[in-house]
Amino acid sequence: MAQIPKFILVYCFILFVLSFPAQAHTANISSSRIITEPGGAYRVEIGFLGTDIERMLAENKSTLADLDLTEPGLIEAMVGKFIQSRIALQNEEGKICPSSVLSVGEDPTNPNDTKAIFRMDCSAVPGKVYYDPYKLINAQGPRAKHLVSIGEKGDDSKLSEKQHQGSEPAPGQVMIYPGDKLIDLSEPLLSPWEMAPKFFSAGIEHIITGYDHLCFLIAVILWASRIWPVVKIVTAFTLSHSVTLTLAALELVNLPSKWVEIAVAISIIYVALENFYTRKVDARWKDTFAFGFIHGFGFASGLIELGIPQRAVVPALASFNIGVEVGQIGVILLILPLLFLIDKYATNGERNKKLVYSISRVIACFGIYWMLVRLEFISEIF
């Protein structure tokens, strides 16, 4: 009887992790910055992870069949036309402002990003102007998010004190999702505290899709047979990763993301192998406290991808971090009862060491796989 739940758990765990890439923090997030120019024109800057652009073009590969992709500038032109056809400035009647592609290329501030700049002439379009990026968001997929910013970077310095504090709405940023309404450029965007639920949900999604972080947490609780040690483990992890998440998000400490991801993979290998040498869970809060500082930099990558307006630092950090904790607790509340049920009905109240060893081996193998991919010794195979 004990073999059935062990087989099911390990098999499901393998299927769960195999379906995800080694880089767990490259969510489908795009951004746009809309800047007013003289004469009723706008400059629209679109930012993407380069990998997202590659994926979207690959999904439309039928249009590329007869093209020589080695021709200089061809791919950039394709990216420009692809985005241009999926974003629009328009009025309430749906009249679209004519647009032109100014440039497409690597974002000088981030070598992993692609940046496309467009000019849209709305001088002959009467009435309010609305921004519609939803064809672009839909092309990104069901998990897409799009961060809209109004005005040049640094415009927050011109806000009033109440706007800085978030007690009054002001132009700035808003995160939109598929199905949201068009952005009215004549109206202030969300205030910092109105943005908080967006960052909260992003925090939950980040931990739920942060498969390396989940492997780490699962590994350290596999021997847990009581609640109190798990409380200490989660509390220690929360305290330490909150410190580095805040430091990184505020740009007070900046570590290369590649080496952070490698260190995260090593931490997974360590806690998985530790399960073979000790069953004492009471002291494992020390592991999560120490490694939590590293994982905090990993969490910060997700928050930085969303973009944090200066006036929204406090609510963004707080709500994103709370979302991460809610996601962690939710995962633990799923895993622990399952382990307790297996103990009760399959092994007479004892933790099955073969089950723990089997899952730990799987987790260690994925930690090694992620480490080798991030060291660029091997390519992603899943």
Image (tube, rainbow, N blue to C red):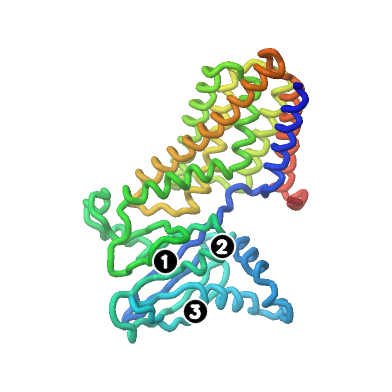
Q: Distance between the residues labelled 1 and 2?
A: 18 Å
- Percent position of residue 274, x then y: 70, 24
Tag 2 secondary structure: helix
Question: N-terminal of the two: label 3 or label 1?
Answer: 1
Residue denoted by label 2: 140
Residue at 57% x, 74% y: name it: 82
Residue at 63% x, 38% y: name it: 264
Task: Locate residue 231 relative to residue 382 in the image: left or right.
Answer: left
Q: Nearer the viewer, residue 203 or 50?
A: 203
- Percent position of residue 25, x then y: 58, 49
Three-letter amino acid code of the residue under disc 1? Arg
Residue denoted by label 1: 33
Q: Which of 321 and 352 is in front in this view?
A: 352
Relative to 77, residue 181 above or below: above
Residue at 32% x, 69% y: name it: 185
Label 3 or label 2, whichever lies nearer to me, is 2
Three-letter amino acid code of the residue under disc 3? Leu
Question: Looking at the image, do the residues carrying marks 3 and 2 touch, with CB atoms under 8 Å apart?
Answer: no
- Percent position of residue 96, x then y: 41, 80
Residue denoted by label 3: 102
Q: Nearer the viewer, residue 256 or 381?
A: 381
Question: N-terminal of the two: label 3 or label 2?
Answer: 3
Res 181 → quadrant: bottom left
Tag 1 secondary structure: strand
Total numbered badges shown on the rendered structure = 3
Q: How far apart are marks 3 and 1 (CA)?
A: 14 Å
